[in-house]
Image (cartoon, helix red, strand yellow):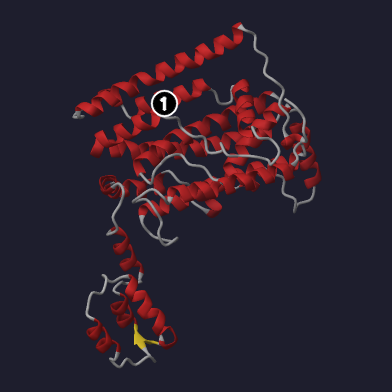
Amino acid sequence: MKISYGAFLASIVATSNAFQQPNYVSRGAATSLNMVAVDPTTVTKKEYQDICGVSFDEDGLMQRLQATNFLHPKHVEVIEDIAPIAGAMVDEILLETGEASWQPQDFLPDLSKEGWEDEVKEVRKMAEGVPDEVMVVLIGDMVTEEALPTYQTLLNTFEGCDDPTGDADSAWARWSRGWTSEENRHGDLLNKYLYLGGRCDMRSVEVTIQHLITNGFNPDARKDPYRGFVYTSFQERATKVSHGNVGKLAGEFGDTSLKKICSKIAGDEARHEKAYQTFCEEILKRDADGLIMVFGDMMRGQISMPAELMTDGVSQSLYEDFSSVAQRLGVYTALDYADIIGHLVKRWDLEHLEGLSAEAEKERDYLCKLPQRYKKLAERSMNKKKKVDEEEPERSFSWIHGRTV
């Protein structure tokens, strides 16, 4: 099939130069080459690819990308080997899309039906009983969920797990898009609940969301899929804990609708947590030393929370204030942080791993002792506060019209 490229001949030649080795031919030889007659009216697709030295169809593009030098080539080999497990996660962990899956509207008043006013009044009546401090933590959780574009961008930085074309059919690309589509429901549902509840300054909340997406966040994954999956294994569990505890508090204060919403979202996070932890388990079977060294290095730092760069444009300490309220309510605490590390150590059975190098053995011992060390530090800090009877300072939040908690 002939394709007209006459208008693009100059760009073809320029593009071809980008894929060729430097030209060291003599000036005379170059001049004679430039004098070769070329018909600029039509060029076949094959001729175009031959000129550029690269294929532009999907298969050819994928092959070229795979030939690119990676920062973590050994890790990429392992990731490619466990791609079938990622495919199984899409089929077994992720829910079906469309009518077979839950949607935010399932938990909200249907404004297209008669009687919707009474349903909205009921939502608002139950929301009135939720204390401001619980509302602040709920808003912070919702803002975190709404920064989903940042998280999908992060997934696409993990070498070997990316979606280079945007609609690639690889197992990892399908997992990334499927995970994103499910997570997208969380922010949508919480956002609509808060809007209907009438307790918040929604514009301030929206400003915070925009700032957070603009600011982004850096979990120190370094394009390494091992680091990425250790991070997501931790973070999905942390998110599950937070949503679950907010739901429990909502139930205690009579908001059964919010309790149901938070429980549903926590259930999603539990499934996603299982998937990411399974990926790490499979990596351990193939490269135990590699994952252990990455896990240890990450734990010597600190797991970054995805909303650390949130701001409402008013408070310079918004994330710290939000975190302090969550800690005080027991929604997400230093003890939870220690428990999550302990869960991962147990889930991956690090204590009984065999065949490790001497260096990895040392790192494994460090990791196995770490949960108890963190727990002791957290308890010591909490007991110290009780002894000196420290009172938490009141904090003002624009999210709730400047009220203090």
Above or below, 25 relative to 160: below
Q: In which quadrant is the N terminus drawn? A: bottom left
| Residue depicted at x 29% and y 63% | 63
Q: Nearer the viewer, residue 283 or 171?
A: 283
Residue 313, how many percent across, how many down? Answer: 69, 41
Tell me where residue 374 sits by quadrant.
top left
Mark 1 element type? helix
- Amino acid type for the residue under numbered disc 1: Ile
- Asked whether, in this view, residue 110 is left or right of residue 86, the answer is right
Reading the image, the residue beneath label 1 is: 341
- Asked whether, in this view, residue 181 is left or right of residue 45, the answer is right
Tell me where residue 279 sits by quadrant.
top left
Residue 360, how many percent across, how many down? Answer: 25, 29
Q: Nearer the viewer, residue 300 or 117?
A: 300
Residue ranking furthest to the top = 387
Q: Nearer the viewer, residue 33 or 216?
A: 33
Q: Is residue 101 visible?
A: no
Tell me where residue 7 sits by quadrant.
bottom left
| Residue depicted at x 68% and y 14% | 391
Q: In which quadrant is the C terminus drawn? A: top right
